[in-house]
Amino acid sequence: GAVVSQHPSWVICKSGTSVKIECRSLDFQATTMFWYRQFPKQSLMLMATSNEGSKATYEQGVEKDKFLINHASLTLSTLTVTSAHPEDSSFYICSARDPRVGSTDYTFGSGTRLTVV
Amino acid sequence: RKEVEQDPGPFNVPEGATVAFNCTYSNSASQSFFWYRQDCRKEPKLLMSVYSSGNEDGRFTAQLNRASQYISLLIRDSKLSDSATYLCVVNRRGRDDKIIFGKGTRLHILP
């Protein structure tokens, strides 16, 4: 089945620094990837939709200048958390859908647990 | 009103029992429906898609009622390993292709 690889699995960074998270579709091309954030005991909240070759679409309330998304190729999307603060500590997860076989289910990366100290 | 609503639980159920969850969605343009399972501090994994005709996968049965806009999941003969959070997921297709998660229902299977 479709595989989505996400790195790093966890990262600890100092307040004020930037962190980049990568999401790769390993065996299919993904024109669209999705970035979610999940706080403890909360549901996954869609942050933005990453579109290959064009600007990402951000959900209401998500700062596009703080959460930079780049989808430069059909297999890679990156999320950069700029000037991270402790309140950005969360579980970030990407997903993509394999369009080849008409599948309607989405595959998720393994997630990145970000801790800002 | 949230687009996808679920009872957060927790449901504490003895091993071997049958348990059912419901989920409602508000957007009638929703086209695809799923149940995902999420273990603590892990990514969600697809449990099963949900079809209008209803579908079964082993001990799991999913139903969709488009008229009433709700989805259900039934787990029979529950196992300890079924303990997890079950996420109801709805996909809107077309110009605005996105998937929306419910908050999840926590299930604890008791020995």
Image (cartoon, coloured by chain):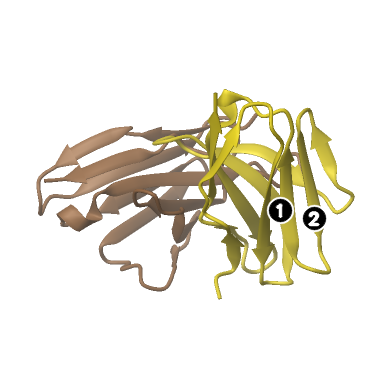
Chain colours: A brown, B yellow
Residue farthest to the right, as pictured = B53
Residue drawn at x 66%, y 71% is: B26
Looking at the rendered structure, the secondary structure element under dot 2 is strand
Residue B87 falls left or right of residue B66: left
Which quarter of the picture shows residue A87? bottom left
Residue farthest to the bottom, as pictured = B1
Residue drawn at x 62%, y 62% is: B97
Q: Is residue A35 above or below residue A48?
A: above
Looking at the rendered structure, the secondary structure element under dot 1 is strand
Q: Is residue A84 visible?
A: no
Residue B110 image point, x, y percent: 54, 29
- Mark 2 and mark 1: span between their CA atoms? 8 Å
Q: Amino acid at mark 1?
A: Phe
Residue drawn at x 74%, y 33% is: B76
* Label 1 crowd (10 A; few <14 / some 14-19 / many >=20): many
Residue A110 image point, x, y percent: 44, 34
Please name the residue that numbered disc 2 is placed on.
B64
Quadrant, the N terminus of chain A: top right
Q: The residue marked by circle 2 belongs to what chain? A: B
Residue A71 falls left or right of residue A27: left
Residue B40 image point, x, y percent: 42, 36
Residue drawn at x 80%, y 50% is: B63
Please name the residue that numbered disc 1 is placed on.
B33
Q: The residue marked by circle 1 belongs to what chain? A: B
The one of A9 and B74 positioned closer to us in this rendering:
B74
Residue A69 image point, x, y percent: 37, 56
